Amino acid sequence: MNLKEKITASFTAPENQGEIAKNALFGEKKLAAFNSFKQQDFPTTKNEDWKYTNLKPLLKNNFELFPNKTHTLQEKDIKKYLLIEESSINLVFVNGFFDSNLSTNLQEISEINTLSSIAAKEKSQAEFKQLFETTESIDNCFVNLNNAFLSDGVFINIPKGKAYEPVIQILYLTHGDAEASMFQAKNLVFVGENSQVKIIESHYNLSENKSLTNSFTEIYAGKSALVAYHKIQNDQVNASLIDHTYVHQKSKSEVSLFTLSLGGDLTRNNLVFNHQGEHINSNLYGVSILNKSQHVDNNTLINHQQPNCESNECYKGIYAENSTGVFNGKVYVHREAQKTNAYQQNDNILLDNTATINAKPQLEIFADDVKCSHGCTMGELDNDALFYLKTRGIPENDAKKLLLYAFANEAVENIKIPSLKKSIAHLIDEKLDTLS
Amino acid sequence: MLEIKNLHASINEKEILKGINLNIKPGEVHAIMGPNGSGKSTLSSVIAGKEDFEVTEGKILFEGEDIEELAPEERAHKGIFLSFQYPIEIPGVTVTNFIKTAVNQMRKAKGKENLPAKELLQMIREKSAMLDIDQKFLSRSLNEGFSGGEKKRNEIFQMAMLEPKLAILDETDSGLDIDALKIVANGVNQLKSKDKAVLIITHYQRLLEYIVPDFVHVLIDGKIAKTGDINLAFELEEKGYDWIK
């Protein structure tokens, strides 16, 4: 039985019907998503967008799809996964289910909810349904799978004119009992007109068993909204992640998305930005530092559909010891999108002969009055720079680290939350120490 | 302090230095002049330990010790400093952070604790004032977008902070206007002492008017062709290099 057959069988198995039907709010959607999923196949390397990421070995795992709900985690166990300590709102999910004991500061806040709690409250349901009607439908095999098996997720709805001060930290923890488990994660973020929000999302496998997390995030940024979203990917080597994040922006909004990939086995990030107004800013920053056969694929698409918008993309990659990086950055400037400014930069350092980078900047421009630039570099550490540092008494390893850190910093310096920037600097420092 | 004996060095199997002899004693200032391509910068790189060059024959002794096997950082720890002709730009590392790392690595190599932040800042303030360096300059990324003069001044600032025994100034005067040249020369002169030595590598005698050398050597085709005092520099300025060959 291959994975698709297993998924199909699990969805229709009588013993799982309770779990599937439980969330009435999604009941219909689940079935529809499942039916679409059945019509689709997992992408292979023959698919242009997946040419450099082979899912075959990963999908050979006999994933358990309905993970156990119970756990023994305590607050002290999860502290190390929280990147900022100040008064943040922490949402903790274990095996896909929200855990109110591990989460903090949640009860009083109406803007931040879980999908399951919305479903449980009749009052919020109508409002949610109304909002939900406005979401874009996405027909993608992993998104369908996510919708079909979803048990819970984050629902953030910041009303008009609210600069939401505390940082929201979303932590998806898993500890599958089966040899391999698949988890679904879902974040639905609505940010009202003139509102602001800052979010950190991360996934950690706490068990010795293999895991695949299939995560789906939708961000709807209203007029003049300001969103800073950070994806921290620093999981164990037995954990893989497939992420789909769709960002929809109304006029004058600014969305910055930072992706830090340090850990995990296979990670695939699919980022799609859609512009639904003018004078929009989209910022995409990424840092990947990999070793030991890790694989990270950053696949980004910026859809410039409207005039007078700007996008900035800066991805930095450092690869060692059999690791592979993929960068596929597509910027699509539609015919209507005059006066577009689109900048893309992707720089890569290969630290040894066993590491690989596949980079594919892709610009498709159908408007004639635009400013678009893209740059892509691949190379090794600059020997002259190393020599310079060494003549100042800095030993080789420290000198290398300093140069690599400075290289990554070009993306990191765009993070606006000082405490998070500090934590990320620390994570990068630790990761650089593991490179030989 | 520095004894170079019959030094031959090559890069990619091309011999650049063809038997150099040089003896620099504490307290002395030496200048090496020579036409383009004579091996001046190679000599400074080889003394500082650049691995691209291979020493095929001869010896470099620093305070009596053969330093051929020492890495550049180890030579730096022993007190050799090279001011670069083309300092490297390092975005993302501020001048202050860089100098802090360098100072503390030097101390670590000598078995000392890190310099307390307050003392370090005090030292930075003094040395930067001496070189007329703006405080804002110190929080900029190392050499990134610096003008030629700023880069050179930053090199001398690093030298002042690291207090080497032997300072090698590789074309430090190039790209400097007369005011900057005076400031840099003044910085170097303040560091001179009876137990320190300076090796100036230059095209022109201009800098030598401000930092007066005890010896002037003329390097031609990888060999020292002539040695004299400051008057040799003036003579070269007037007549060029051809008459020496």
Image: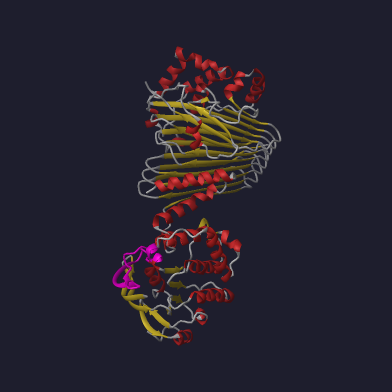
Find residue A173 and report its horizontal and vertical position in percent: 48, 30
Lateral position of residue B178 relative to residue A57, left or right: right
Provide the residue span drawn in magenta.
Answer: B49-77
User: Which residue is most to the top?
Assistant: A14
Looking at the image, can residue B225 be seen?
yes
Tell me if residue B24 comes above or below residue A98 in the rendering. Answer: below
Q: Is residue A81 shown in magenta?
A: no
The residue at 39%/84% (across/down) is B227
Find residue B80 and report its horizontal and vertical position in percent: 41, 69
Q: How many marks?
A: 0
Find residue A1 and report its horizontal and vertical position in percent: 37, 20
Looking at the image, can residue A381 be seen?
no
Find residue B213 and report its horizontal and vertical position in percent: 46, 81
User: Which residue is most to the left?
Assistant: B57
Lateral position of residue A427 relative to residue A247, left or right: left
Which of B115/A203 is in front? B115
Q: Is residue B74 shown in magenta?
A: yes
The residue at 55%/28% (across/down) is A138
Res A293 quadrant in image = top left
Instruction: State the scheme by which the image is colored.
Output: secondary structure
Which of A427/A315 is in front? A427
The residue at 60%/45% (across/down) is A416
Lateral position of residue B55 relative to residue B40, left or right: left
Which of B190/B20 is in front? B190
Lateral position of residue A42 relative to residue B3, left or right: right
Which of A25/A169 is in front? A169
